[in-house]
Image (tube, grey):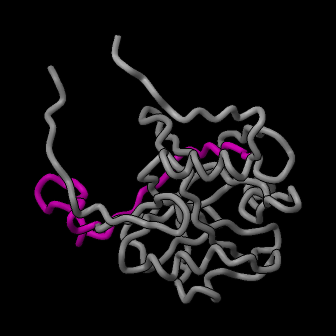
Amino acid sequence: MQDFKRDTIDTATTSWVASYRRLTEVVIPRPIALVATVDPDGNTNLAPFSFFTVVSSNPPFIAFAPHRVGRTGSKKDTLRNVEQVREFTVSVVNEEIAERVNNCAAPLPYGDSEFEHSGLTPVAAERVKAPLVAESPVALECTLEEIRTYGDEGGAGSLVVGRVVLMHFDPAVRDPVEGRVLPELLRAVGRMGGSLWCRTRDTFLLDRPS
């Protein structure tokens, strides 16, 4: 029998902070959703979330998972806005805007705009109230489908699922014949553990088995 030795962590007896650190160190690389929302008064909010994925293609749904604030258990501004206005946009984060996107994670008072704080530019969307990000080459306009909540203490997460109603692409990142988004032109970035980010330049090809 092959020898199998591993360090084992029991999540029932481990702090949520330690569990968070280990999970974000191994669930990598994680794409980043730059989520724009508005509150009922029209104030904009912009925040990055690396717990982000596609849920369904037919119909098209995506999801991201904001955590509650660790020290207080309070909801983040993005979640509060989505609950009330039920719309949001998601922009792709590439190398050119990574540092400004990181600045959007600053803990600003509710109602203060991360657009102004980061230097990113809001542009009116077509179907939803939340703005697009002018500097991002790809943006998705979404309406809220559902929110699932997994606890109400610090570090607890909510799963926000949105229907994609419009997709916007900068022609500069697409193949002009096939329309595919080319990764070498998109230059998306992702999150690793801690403060480590990654680029998507180093790729390799594996054909899916027939």
Q: Where is residue 190, by image quadrant?
A: bottom left
The vertical placement of 9 against 176, above or below, is above
Which residue is pictured at 29% across the width and 61% down the height? 200
Horizontal side of 29 relative to 104 (left or right) equals: left
Residue 159 on image: x %, y %:
67, 43
Q: Residue at x 34, y 16 (%)?
A: 2
Q: Between 84 and 24, which is closer to the camera in this rendering?
A: 24
Picture quadrant where residue 36 is located: bottom right
Between residues 134 and 27, which one lies in front from this camera angle?
27
Q: Is residue 43 left or right of residue 37?
A: right
Residue 91 image point, x, y percent = 48, 65
Q: What is the quadrant of the C terminus in the image?
A: top left
Residue 115, placed above or below residue 189: below
Quarter of the image with the N terminus in it: top left
Image coordinates of residue 120 in percent, x first then y, are 53, 84
State whether residue 165 is above or below residue 185. Answer: above
Instruction: Report whether 31 appears left or right of 181.
Output: right
